[in-house]
Image (cartoon, helix red, strand yellow):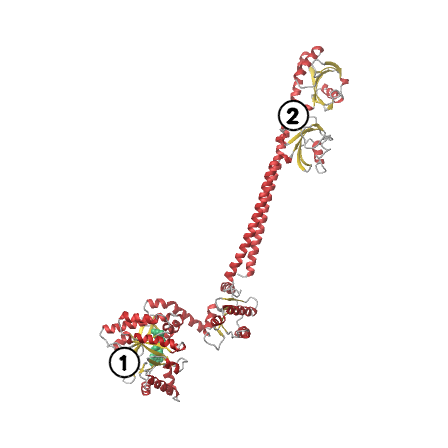
Amino acid sequence: MERKDIRNKLMRITVFMVAGILVLFGIASSVLLYINNTMHETIHEQMEQEASEYKTRLIKQIETDFEILHTLAAFIEYNGINDRETLAEGLNLINQKNSFITIALIDKNGKGVISTEKPGATRNFFLSQLQEPGKTAIERAMEGESLVSPIFISSNLESQIYTYNVPVYNKKEIIGVLSASDKLEKYEDILKGNTVMGGNGYIHIIDSEGKFLVRSSKTVVHEQNMTSIFDGPYTNEKNRQLVIKALQEQKTVFSEFKYNNENYHFYIQPVGINGWYILCVNDLWGYVFFFRQILTVVGVSAAIMLLLMVFFMFHGYMLLKKSYIQLMNLAYFDRITGAGNIWQFQQKFETLQKKDENHSIVAVNIRNFKFINELYGENEGNKLLCYIKKVIEEHLHPDEFFCRDTADLFYILFKEISETKIRERLGSIIKQVSEITQNDKHGYETRMYCGVAVNGDMVHSILAMQSIKRNLGRDIAFCDENLYKKKKKESQIESHMQTALQNEQFKLFLQPKICLADGSLSGAEALVRWQTGETTFIPPSDFIPLFEGNGFCAKLDMYMVSKVCNMIRNWIDEGIKPIPISINQSKILFHENNYIRNLDALINRYGIPPSYITLEILEGLADSNIEEINMKIRQLHEKGFKVSMDDFGTGYSSLNTLYQLEIDELKIDQNFLREASTDKSHRRWIILEQIIKMSQKLGIPTVAEGIETKEDVDKLASLGCNYGQGFFYSKPISVRDFNKKYMG
Ligand code: C2E
Ligand code: MG
Ligand code: MG
C-alpha cells in the first residue's frame, strides 16, 4: 500500500467522520425541533381545550338565565298580565332569587313594570324610556325571538350591561316581552382566577370587531388604553389580517405576539352568541417555562455531549491516523532508508503480474557490506543504504518500483526486458554508487552486484545474483534456465537432507588406499553416497558443496565418523584386523568448539583405537590462522588421531604455508595427476616430484589420488609417492563389497 492509498483511506475516514458529525447534529436538531413542535402542539391543544371549556361555561350561564326567563314567561302566560300589582310583586320576588339587575315585563303597548335589585323597587315605565340596544332587543322579542341584546353602558349603573329578552305568550299570541338585564362583569367571575392554563394564561371576551367585552383582570399586556385587540401588541403586520378574517368568518385562529421581549400565544374561538369571541392568551414563557428549562437542559447537554463526542472522535481520529501511519510505515516501509519494504514490493509485483506485463526483477547486493558495517560502524552502513536508495530512485522510470528487503539486499522492478538496456541502467546505478563512496571521507569502494530475472521473480533474480557472489569480475548476471534448474535441484536436496539422515539414506562407501611400492592395502577412504532408490545414488559433488554452505555438512561428517567407528568395531568384534580409515572433514566442522570432544566421545563409545582414524582436512583451511589450526591438529594428535591434508593443489596456498601445518599425510589432488599425464613438457611432473621430495624431507607421507593406469602407478612410485588411490585399484564400494574384497 502506498502513501497515496493511505491518504485516500484517511480521507475516507475523514469524510465518514464529518458525515457522522453532521448526522449527529441533524439528529440532535431534529430531536430539539420535535420537542419544540410537540411543545407548541401541546400548548395549542391546551389553549383550545381551555377556550372550549370557558365557552361551555359561558353558554351554560346564558342558557340558565334564559331558562329562568322562559319559566317566568310560562308562569305569566298562565296567570295573564292584567293584574299588574301581583305581577310586579312576582317580579320582585323572582329578582331577589337570582342574579339579574332588573327584570321587566313590557306589554304590547310598550308599557311595562320593572323590578330592580333593591326589593320593592318596582315601577312602571314605557318602552320608549329605555336605552337603545335594550329597546331594540325588546322589539325583536315582541316579534317572537329570544335573544341577548348587544352590550351597552347603562346610564343608571354606568357599567356595561346586556339584556335577555323572551316573548310572553297567551294562547299562542305574544302579549309582551320579559327582559332581564345583567352586568357584563358577571362573566369576569368566570374568567377570573388562576385556573386558566394552570395559572399561565388568561381569557377575554371580545366582539367581532376585536373590542374587549369582558376582560380578565390577570393580563400580561397593559391594556388600560386599549379598547380592542388591534390597539396593542396582540396583533402586528403579520397576523392582523389573519385575525380580522377569523373574526369576520367566525373561525378560530392561533397566533403569536411578542411583548416585552417575550413570546406569547393567543387563540380566538367564537362563542356563537352575539358575535362574541373567547380570546385565550397563553403566557408562553410562563407556561412553557418548565418545558423551556427541560429543553434548555436537554439542548445544552446535547451540545456538550456533541462537543465531547466531536472532541473524542477527533482525538480518536488523530490517534487512529497516527497509529495507522505508524502501522503503515512499519508494515510497508523500510525503517532505515524510507524505501518501500518487501511486503509493499510483493503487493505491487502481484498486481503487475495480474496484468501480465513485461518486466525484469533485479536483486542488488553490495560486496562485503558486512565489512563496511564492521569497519566504519552501523551508521556509515545505514548512510550507504540511504544513498543507494536515492540512486535507485533516481534511475526509476514511471510505474517502476523498488524496495530494500534485508541488510544490503534491494529489489528493483524495471519495465524493461532488453538485456542491453538493463545492463546500461544497472551499470549507471553501480557506477554512481561506487563513485560517491570513493569520494567520501572513508574512500572505500562500494561494489554492487546484481542478478536479473527477465520476466521472472525474486527467487530467479537472487539465483542469478548468487551465481556471481564470488566472481569479482562480474557485476551483473542474468538468470537462465540451467541456473534455475540447478537451484531448484539444490533446494530439493536441502529440503530432504534432514529426513534422509534420519532414514539412513547416507551410505558409507570405501575406496582402498594402496601402498605403491608393493600394492598392499594400507587403508581406505570413507566416502558418502546418498542412496535414493535401490540402485540410485546422488554423488557427493551434488550435495557436499551445498551442505558446506548451509552447515549441514558438519552433522553429516560426524555421522560418517560414527559409521566408520561402527564398522571398525564390527571388524574388531569379528576378529578382523582393522585398517586405518580416512574420513573427510568439512571446514565448518573442524572449526566447531566441541569438535574434538565429540570425536573423542564417539571413539570411546565404540571402544576403538583412535589411530585407525585419519581426518582429512581441506587445503582451504590454510586460509585461516595457521597457528590456530596447528593447535587443533596438536589436540587431535594428543587424542591419537591422524590428520591428512586432502585435495592438495586445488587451492592457492603456497607450499611454505602448507608445510607449516603439522599434518601426518599429504593427499595430492587427482587433477594434478590428470594435468601431469597430459603435460608433454613434463613441467607438472617436475612440480609433483618436488612436492613429493619436499614432503619426504619433512617426513610427511604422500598419497596420490585418481590413479587410473599402471603408468600412473609406476611413475608415482618412481617419484617416491607412498600411497595411491584410484579406479585403477578400485572405485569406492559399499562396506559389504569392501569386506568381501579386502577384509576376508
Ligand atoms: P575426495 O575426498 O578427494 O575423494 C576422492 C574423490 O575422487 C571421490 O569422489 C572418488 O570417487 C574420486 N576418485 C577416486 N579415484 C578416482 C579415479 O581414479 N578417477 C576419478 N575420476 N575419480 C576418482 P567422490 O566420492 O565423488 O567424492 C567427491 C568429494 O566429495 C570428495 O573428494 C570429498 O571432498 C567429498 N566427500 C565425499 N564424501 C564426503 C564426506 O563424507 N564428507 C565430506 N565433508 N566430504 C565428502
Ligand atoms: Mg578425501
Ligand atoms: Mg581428494
* Whether label 2 touches label 1, CB < 8 Å: no
Q: Is residue 38 visible?
A: no
Q: In what quadrant of the picture does the C terminus appear?
A: bottom left
Q: Please determine whether, in this image, residue 709 is positioned above or below residue 163.
A: below
Three-letter code, disc 2: Ile
Query: Quick one: label 2 or label 1, which is nearer the N terminus?
Result: 2
Q: Nearer the viewer, residue 64 or 693?
A: 693
Three-letter code, disc 1: Leu
Q: x%, y% of residue 79?
A: 67, 11
Residue sticking out furthest to the bottom: 681
Q: Which mark is residue 190?
A: 2
Q: Give residue 600's quadrant in the image.
A: bottom left
The reply, left or right, for residue 461 in relation to residue 534 is right
The reply, left or right, for residue 303 in relation to residue 119 is left
Q: Give residue 654's quadrant in the image.
A: bottom left
Q: Please determine whether, in this image, residue 288 is positioned above or below residue 128.
A: below
Q: Which mark is residue 563?
A: none
- Determine if the C-beta at disc 2 is less than 8 A from ligand 1: no
Residue at position x 63%, y 34% in the image = 286
Label 1 packing within 10 angstroms: few (<14), some (14-19), many (20+): some
- Determine if the C-beta at disc 1 is less than 8 A from ligand 1: no
Splitting the image into four quadrants, where does ligand 2 fall?
bottom left
Q: x%, y% of residue 246?
A: 69, 33
The reply, left or right, for residue 310 in relation to residue 516 is right
The residue pinned by badge 1 equals: 521
Q: x%, y% of residue 637?
A: 31, 76
Label 2 packing within 10 angstroms: few (<14), some (14-19), many (20+): some
Residue sticking out furthest to the left: 575
For the residues labelled 2 and 1, the Cα–Cα distance comes to 145 Å
